[in-house]
Image (cartoon, helix red, strand yellow):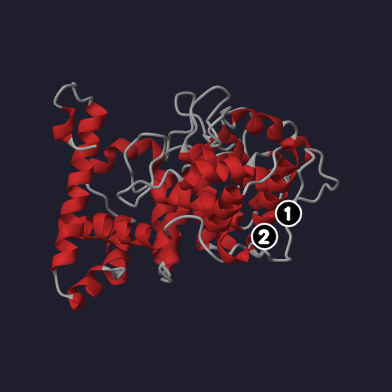
């Protein structure tokens, strides 16, 4: 919406923020389009060496502005260590040793990880989210010392879709996931799926990108993913990509770099659930006949792979017929996936590289 067209109304704070973001993104894209092609190619490169230098330095020192994340320090370890691993770099022995030692000091003797050393007390209890971050950071580091430092989890904790995922995920990677732990989890997450198709943090709340990823991933890990309305979930996720090319977390909100992970992660899961989506669409068509327009929309959504013969039949009854959950996640990520992305992936990459990376490197 053009600000000049809203002269008869009073803009809201959200509208002003949206206009500001759109203006900044437009300026970046306008600058990009005006420079020579060779310079454009450089701007669209991932500055790997710069990122590795920044990340490695950040493991030992962060500026004062990060003090607001003092209760989330295992998350900082996870984000940094995982990013370094994704860039194909390894940490030297001393840095690995320091990271393991730090995370070990965040661990409560009775299980679980707090937000930092000394925070596992009555005031700062161990938390599922920081436990998830710490365990995944240690698994990313790998090795006997890192894995041996992990104890079991504590009882009680959070009661939203994010907590369901972090608990299920940690239990899965530690190979302690069982029928008792997942009891009624699928029912709860199913109750969090909203009329829009996304998943909220709790029943009756608004669908949100972070909770959608967490809820969907948890349902995958417990083998109940096709209890969700997946076609509606696909619609909700792909329509969260804004005209700036990034993702927003909720309907009518600003695009934000972090949702490239949450919404993009949900799409990556959905691409491996192609056959389940097809089955649900087929079931729906028996109730409401499929029109030519609907078929064209579906072709556009799923690309050229809609006639594939590979099928993923995973759970769905809420009562899995097996008690061994240890290979569900591993088998899932090795499943065939739809070849074509469900959203404009190239535009998202350009948004990240131009609007996030270049800006960060210019002020870093």
Q: Nearer the viewer, residue 22 or 156?
A: 22
Quadrant in which the C terminus appears: bottom left
Q: Nearer the viewer, mark 1 or mark 2?
A: 2
**Point 36% across, 34% down: residue:** 252
Q: In the rendered image of this protein, does residue 228 appear above or below residue 96?
A: above
Which residue is the extreme one toward the front? Answer: 292
Q: Position of residue 111 (x, y in %)?
A: 60, 38
Q: Nearer the viewer, residue 225 or 331?
A: 225
**Marks 1 and 2, how far apart at CA:** 8 Å
In the rendered image, which quarter is residue 144 located in?
Answer: bottom right
In the rendered image, which quarter is residue 59 located in?
Answer: bottom left
Q: Position of residue 240 (x, y in %)?
A: 42, 43
**Point 13% across, 66% down: residue:** 34
What label sits on residue 58 in the rendered view?
none
Q: Nearer the viewer, residue 311 or 298?
A: 298
Q: From the image, tell me which residue sits under label 2.
A: 330
**Point 42% across, 60% down: residue:** 345
Determine whether, in the image, residue 249 is placed left or right of residue 355: right
Q: Position of residue 117 (x, y in %)?
A: 42, 40
Q: Secondary structure at mark 2?
A: helix
Quadrant in which the N terminus appears: top left
Residue neighbourhood size for the residue with mark 1, other residues' Cα within 10 Å, grouped as few (<14), some (14–19), many (≥20): some
Q: Position of residue 129 (x, y in %)?
A: 51, 39
Label pair 1/2, CB-CB below 8 angstroms: yes
Q: From the image, tell me which residue sits under label 1.
A: 326
Which residue is the extreme one toward the right? Answer: 321
Q: Nearer the viewer, residue 125 or 253?
A: 253
């Amino acid at each position: 919406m053009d600000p000049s067209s809203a002269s008869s109304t009073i803009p809201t704070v959200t509208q002003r923020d949206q206009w500001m973001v759109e203006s900044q993104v437009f300026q970046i894209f306008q600058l990009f389009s005006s420079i020579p092609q060779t310079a454009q190619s450089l701007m669209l490169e991932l500055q790997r060496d710069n990122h590795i230098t920044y990340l490695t330095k950040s493991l030992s020192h962060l500026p004062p502005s990060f003090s607001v994340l003092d209760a989330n320090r295992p998350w900082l370890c996870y984000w940094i260590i995982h990013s370094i691993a994704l860039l194909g770099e390894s940490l030297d022995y001393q840095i690995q040793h320091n990271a393991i030692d730090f995370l070990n000091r965040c661990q409560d003797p009775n299980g679980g990880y707090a937000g930092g050393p000394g925070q596992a007390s009555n005031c700062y209890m161990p938390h599922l989210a920081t436990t998830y971050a710490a365990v995944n950071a240690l698994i990313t580091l790998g090795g006997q010392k890192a894995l041996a430092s992990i104890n079991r989890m504590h009882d009680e904790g959070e009661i939203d879709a994010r907590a369901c995922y972090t608990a299920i995920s940690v239990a899965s990677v530690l190979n302690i996931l069982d029928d008792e732990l997942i009891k009624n989890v699928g029912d709860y997450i199913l109750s969090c799926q909203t009329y829009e198709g996304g998943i909220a943090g709790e029943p009756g709340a608004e669908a949100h990108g972070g909770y959608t990823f967490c809820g969907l991933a948890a349902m995958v890990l417990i083998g109940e993913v096709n209890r969700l309305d997946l076609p509606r979930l696909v619609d909700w996720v792909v329509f969260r990509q804004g005209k700036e090319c990034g993702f927003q977390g909720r309907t009518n909100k600003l695009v934000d770099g972090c949702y490239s992970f949450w919404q993009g992660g949900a799409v990556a899961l959905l691409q491996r659930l192609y056959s389940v989506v097809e089955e649900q669409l087929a079931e729906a068509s028996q109730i409401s006949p499929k029109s030519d327009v609907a078929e064209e929309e579906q072709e556009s959504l799923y690309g050229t792979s809609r006639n594939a013969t590979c099928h993923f039949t995973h759970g769905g009854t809420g009562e899995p017929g097996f008690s061994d959950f240890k290979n569900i996640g591993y088998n899932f990520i090795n499943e065939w996936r739809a070849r074509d992305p469900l959203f404009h992936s190239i535009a998202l990459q350009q948004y990240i590289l131009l609007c996030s990376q270049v800006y960060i490197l210019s002020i870093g």
